[in-house]
Image (cartoon, rainbow, N blue to C red):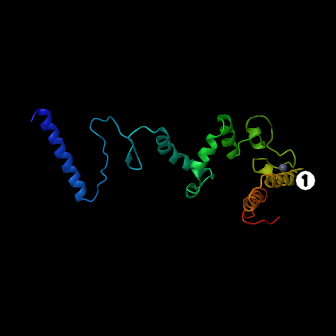
């Protein structure tokens, strides 16, 4: 045998020996250690990644800290995190233009042109609702107790109902969404109820 053939045979024997070790321990999926020639290796969920998938790396690095931040801000508890269908959220967000994505993200956390932020931005001296005089944050807008706000809320619900009918939205979906909207206006209502 030539030198290269002997080395090839030696490596084959080593590989076979390692395979036998794995079979003996009933662990035929070998761990994938960092090779001596690798300057570094990345593991996600204890699995070594074979290519630099930036989204996965981003998620592994940023997500734990982000979840802690959401929990601290009382926005999304860790136990509720798994209830969100993230691939659908991802698909919906990717269907928007970048400016719309920013707009949606800000509105999701209540950052919009309401009294609270207008005062922070130096646009107003007070953070009061112009209709009722109470402090105005994003949740106050649908909950404002003033008569014009009540009228507008009813009008919008009526328009939504007409839209449901025009698009032949399935009745259970329309019912659920109406009940859900009521929990925004009157937060003590349960989403399952259809009480006025
Ligand atoms: Zn108000």
Q: Residues within 10 Å of mark 1 (few under 14, many from 20)?
A: few
Instruction: Check mark 1 vs ligand 1: CB closer than 8 Å? yes or no.
Output: no
Image position, residue 160 (x, y; %): 81, 52
Q: Residue 42 sits in which quadrant?
A: top left
What residue is drawn where x is 63% and y is 51%? Answer: 75
Residue 108 relative to residue 130: left or right: left
Image position, residue 157 (x, y; %): 83, 54
The kind of secondary structure element at disc 1 is helix
Residue 60 relative to residue 114: left or right: left
Residue wearing tag 1: 147
Q: Residue 175 sits in which quadrant?
A: bottom right
What residue is drawn where x is 87% and y is 47%? Answer: 131
Q: Residue furthest left?
A: 1
Image position, residue 138 (x, y; %): 75, 47
What residue is drawn where x is 63% and y is 42%? Answer: 93
The front one of 97 and 188 is 97
The front one of 180 and 87 is 87
Residue 182 relative to residue 102: left or right: right
* 26 to 114, vertically: above or below: below
The front one of 1 and 76 is 1
Quadrant position of the N terminus in the picture: top left
Image position, residue 55 (x, y; %): 50, 40
What residue is drawn where x is 68% and y is 42%? Answer: 104
* 158 to 15, vertically: above or below: below
């Amino acid at each position: 045998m030539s030198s290269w053939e002997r080395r090839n045979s030696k490596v084959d024997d080593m590989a076979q020996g390692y395979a036998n070790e794995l079979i003996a321990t009933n662990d035929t999926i070998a761990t994938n250690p960092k090779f001596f020639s690798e300057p570094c290796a990345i593991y996600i969920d204890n699995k070594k990644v074979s290519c630099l998938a930036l989204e996965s790396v981003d998620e592994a690095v940023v997500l734990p800290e982000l979840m802690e931040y959401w929990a601290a801000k009382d926005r999304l508890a860790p136990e509720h995190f798994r209830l969100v269908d993230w691939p659908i959220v991802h698909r919906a967000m990717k269907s928007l233009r970048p400016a719309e994505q920013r707009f949606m993200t800000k509105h999701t956390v209540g950052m919009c042109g309401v009294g609270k932020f207008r005062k922070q931005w130096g646009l107003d001296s007070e953070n009061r609702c112009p209709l009722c005089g109470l402090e105005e944050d994003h949740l106050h807008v649908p909950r404002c107790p003033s008569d014009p706000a009540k009228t507008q809320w009813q009008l919008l619900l009526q328009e939504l109902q007409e839209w449901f009918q025009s698009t032949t939205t399935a009745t259970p979906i329309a019912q659920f969404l109406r009940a859900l909207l009521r929990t925004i206006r009157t937060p003590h209502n349960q989403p399952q109820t259809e009480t006025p």
